[in-house]
Image (cartoon, helix red, strand yellow):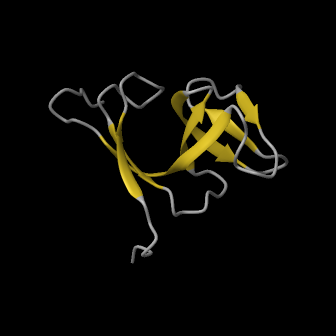
Amino acid sequence: MTPKNSCKAYYSYSEKLGHINSGTKLLVDRAIKPVDRHLLLVQIDGKHEVCKLVTIVRRRLESLIDKNVFIEFGEAFTDDELVIEGVVTHIIYDARNDVFD
């Protein structure tokens, strides 16, 4: 059941990011509290990215492109350069344009 205060939004990704292809639709829920290993839609210096939340040992975001790149942040999910848009709940690919392995 979806909470009444849930705010879901679709975001159309315009460039390839790791395994997320251009034109992919992301369903983002702003009402879900992010926990370890969730994929998050974040805005870093005004640019949207999808990162994995890692909270073991210290709080950081893991890049989907290079697993050795981490973005550290404090206890709060807000920062001047970092804005958490929400938790990615579904990734919708356009099957007409993709080749599946």
Q: Residue furthest right?
A: 57
Q: Residue 99, relative to residue 95: is it above or below?
A: above
| Residue 67 position in % (x across, y down) | 65, 29
Q: Quadrant of the C terminus?
A: top left
Q: Image quadrant for the N terminus? A: bottom left
Q: Quadrant of residue 13?
A: top left
Residue drawn 60% across the image and 45% down it: 84
How many discs appear?
Answer: 0
Residue 90 in the figure: left or right of residue 78: left
Foreground pick, 13 / 36 = 13
Side of 94 where 73 appears, left or right? right
Q: Toward the viewer: 93 or 80?
A: 80
What x and y, as percent, mark residue 22? Answer: 33, 25
Q: Residue furthest left?
A: 96
Tell me where residue 99 appears, x and y as whole percent: 24, 26
Residue at horizontal 19 percent and vertical 26 percent from the top: 97
> In the figure, residue 74 lies in which quadrant?
top right
Residue 5 at x, y = what percent?
46, 71
Q: Is 9 situated left or right of 39 in this image?
A: left
Q: Is residue 32 left or right of residue 75?
A: left
Q: Residue at x 40, y 73 (%)?
A: 2
**Camera-side residue: 82 or 14?**
82
* Residue at point 70%, 25% (across, down): 69
